[in-house]
Amino acid sequence: MKTMIFCLTSFFLTLTTISAQTTATWIGGMPGKPCDWNSPYNWSEGRVPDENAQVIIPSDRQYYPVIITEVPDIDALLIAGGARLKLESGASLSILGGSGRLEVLTVLGLIVNEGKLNAEITGTAQAGMSGKIVGAGICIFPDSSVNDDVAQK
């Protein structure tokens, strides 16, 4: 009986952990705050992404996200071709890459970084860069998975 309870508990804990991973897709356009990353109404899921979220910024949006402060850590970030993300001076975004579902950071579009962008690209984690990261902000990529030209700007 104890073994059965333990197995059921383990199963439900595993199921909860797996289902905790989410995809957060930017929709933007909330009246009064159309570009605000911290507005839950700018996300298709109705909540601001957190450490369990694989964030996707699609290319077909009228408004793109702007981060003006430190925001919660996220799991992965994909900026589609033609899409963009801006980090204002004083803003901070950390990408943890813990789930392995998506590459830690994929930039096909543009990141304008005037703040601090930190991507935990270590071990087997990957980064895909055919887009650009520009701006005077700080980029922290602790592994050589990203070439120096992209990591600098």
Image (tube, rainbow, N blue to C red):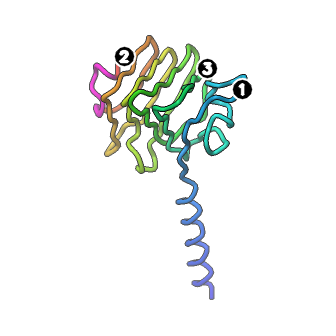
Q: Which residue is mark 2?
A: 153
Q: Is residue 1 left or right of residue 150?
A: right
Say which residue appears at 44% left-offset and 42% top-offset.
97
Which structural element holds mark 3?
A: loop
Task: Tell me the kind of residue under disc 3.
Answer: Ile
Magenta run includes residue 19:
no
Q: Residues within 10 Å of mark 1 (few under 14, many from 20)?
A: few
Looking at the rendering, the stretch of residues picked out in magenta corresponds to 144-150
Q: Is 101 placed above or below 152 here?
A: below
Q: Is residue 56 above or below residue 112?
A: below
Q: Label 2 to label 3, Cα distance in Å?
A: 19 Å
Front-most of residues 11 and 57 = 57
Q: Which residue is mark 1?
A: 31
Disc 2 residue type (three-letter): Lys
Disc 1, SS: loop
The outermost residue toward the bottom is 1
Query: Can you tell which quarter of the image residue 42 is in?
Result: top right
Q: Nearer the viewer, residue 131 or 89?
A: 131
Which numbered disc covers residue 129? none
Q: Name the amino acid, label 1.
A: Pro
Residue marked by disc 3: 68
> Of marks 1 and 2, which one's residue comes earlier in the chain?
1
Q: CA distance from mark 3 to mark 1?
A: 17 Å
Query: Is disc 2 placed on a helix, strand or loop?
Result: loop
Q: Nearer the viewer, mark 3 or mark 1?
A: 1
At a point 59% along the width and 66% down the height, the residue shown is 13
Answer with left or right where residue 71 lies relative to residue 76. Answer: right
